[in-house]
Image (cartoon, grey):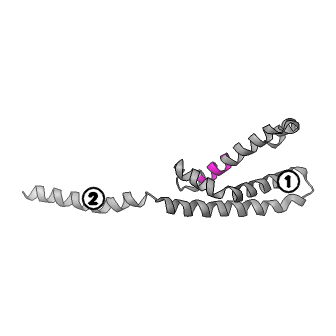
Amino acid sequence: MKKTFIIFLFVTLLTLILSPLATSKTTTASKQETIYSAYIDKFISMCESKVKLRKSRLQNIRREAALYCFKANFFKRYKEELIQDMIAENVGVKQHRIHYYLNKKFFEMFRAALAAIPHMRKNAEILL
C-alpha cells in the first residue's frame, strides 16, 4: 500500500512538472502571425539597408543591391499571404526555418519571372 502511494505520488508530480513544458512548446496561430510579421519586418529592413549600396562603383555590388530592392518590395507586397502560407505549411518559429522559407518563396517567384522574359534568359545564369 505504501509503495503504491509513493509511485502514485511520483507519477502525479512528474505529470504536474512535465505538462506545462509540453504545452508551452505549442504556439497558437495568432502568436505565429506575430512572430512571422516581426521577422518579415526585420527582413525588409535588412534588405532596405543593403539597397543603399546601389551607388557603388562595383557592378556586382550594384546587382546585389538591385536584388535586395526586389526582395524588399516582394516582402512588403506579399507579407500577409506569406504569413498565411507559413502557418498553413507549419514552418515553425525557428528563425532559420522562417529565413529559409522566405528566401525560397522569393527565388521561386524571381526565377519564374526571369524565365518569362525571353531576352533575359542568357543573363539569368549570371543573376542566379
- Name the amino acid, label 1: Ile
**Residue 26 x, y percent position in the rendering:** 43, 57
Q: Seen in the image, is 119 located left or right of residue 43?
A: right
Chief SS of the magenta region: helix
- Give amino acid for label 2: Thr
Single out the residue that lies furthest toward the left. 1
Q: How crowded is mark 2: few (under 14 residues within 10 Å), some or many (20 or more)?
A: few
The percent position of residue 121, horizontal first and vertical second, equals: 84, 36
**Between residues 77 and 96, which one lies in front from this camera angle?**
77
> For the residue labelled by badge 1, is the local secondary structure a helix, a strand or a loop?
helix
Q: What element carries label 2?
A: helix
Residue 68 in which image quadrant = bottom right
Q: Identify the residue at horizontal 50%, vertical 62% (top origin).
A: 30
Residue placed most toward the observer, 98 or 70: 70
Question: Is residue 68 highlighted in magenta?
Answer: no
Ranked by sequence position, the earlier of labels 2 and 1 is: 2
Dot label at residue 61: 1
State which quarter of the image contains the N terminus.
bottom left
Q: Which residue is drawn at 63% across and 53% down?
A: 99
- Residue position marked by numbered label 2 in the rendering: 15
- Look at the image and tell me in which quarter the C terminus lies: top right
Is 68 placed left or right of 29 in the picture?
Answer: right
The stretch of residues the image draws in magenta is: 98-104
